[in-house]
Amino acid sequence: MPDVYVAAGSNIQPELNLRSAISALKRRLGDLRISRAYRNKAVGFEGPDFINLVIGFETELTLTEVLSVLQAVEGLCGRPRKAPKFEPRSMDLDLLLYGDMVCATHAITLPRPDLIKKVYMLGPLAELAPDFVHPTLKQTIGELWQGFDKTAHPMALVTI
């Protein structure tokens, strides 16, 4: 079973929506590993701060099935199916890694290209999976995090 990692973020009632998403994902996927949560400024637009974390799990579901679960949970949290980019979000679930799969389709690119560029994805992922080897860069997530410029986009630890 592949290890799967998903970034979760919200800036509309983030504490409530993140708790709801985690609960819904547990019902559908079973045991979850959850990073600490971090508050950070919105990126790409003006808006309320986001709270972000990363969720890890093992699954027998296919990639397509996992994507369907993530979209369904976003919907449960009030996110419209075709929500525009760069605006406030009730829930954003981004698939970062699906085992060591490397793919690029109209629906998804894995590993997620901006994983190594966004502090709120890489930092929490490094908490959960520091020894996971990035499928294309061949460095561990911990090594990538160690070399990351953490000052460019500060995060503050929060409790949800």
Image (cartoon, helix red, strand yellow):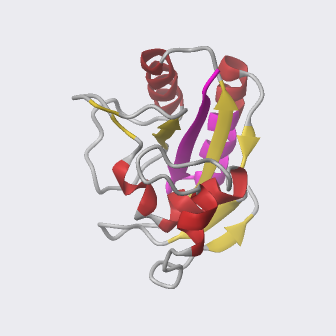
Furthest residue toward bottom: 151
**In percent of the image, x 56 and y 14: which residue is there?**
61
Q: What residue is drawn where x is 69% and y is 42%?
A: 19
| Viewer can see residue 61 | yes
Coordinates of residue 148 in the picture (x, y in percent): 50, 74
Q: Is residue 147 left or right of residue 113?
A: right
Q: Residue at x 68, y 52 (%)?
A: 131
Work out whether 86 lies above or below 82. below
For the N terminus, give its image quadrant: top right
Q: Residue furthest left?
A: 106
Residue drawn at (49%, 43%) of the image:
91
Residue 89 percent across, percent down from the top left: 42, 49
- Placement of the C terminus among the 4 image quadrants: bottom right
Boundaries of the magenta span = 1-22
Q: Nearer the viewer, residue 148 or 45?
A: 148
Determine whether 103 is above or below 126 in the image: above
User: Residue 139 in magenta?
Assistant: no
Answer whether residue 50 is visible to the viewer in this image: no
Outermost residue on the front side: it is: 138
- In this view, the residue in front, 98 or 159, is 98
Q: Position of residue 151 (x, y in %)?
A: 51, 85
Q: Position of residue 143 (x, y in %)?
A: 59, 66
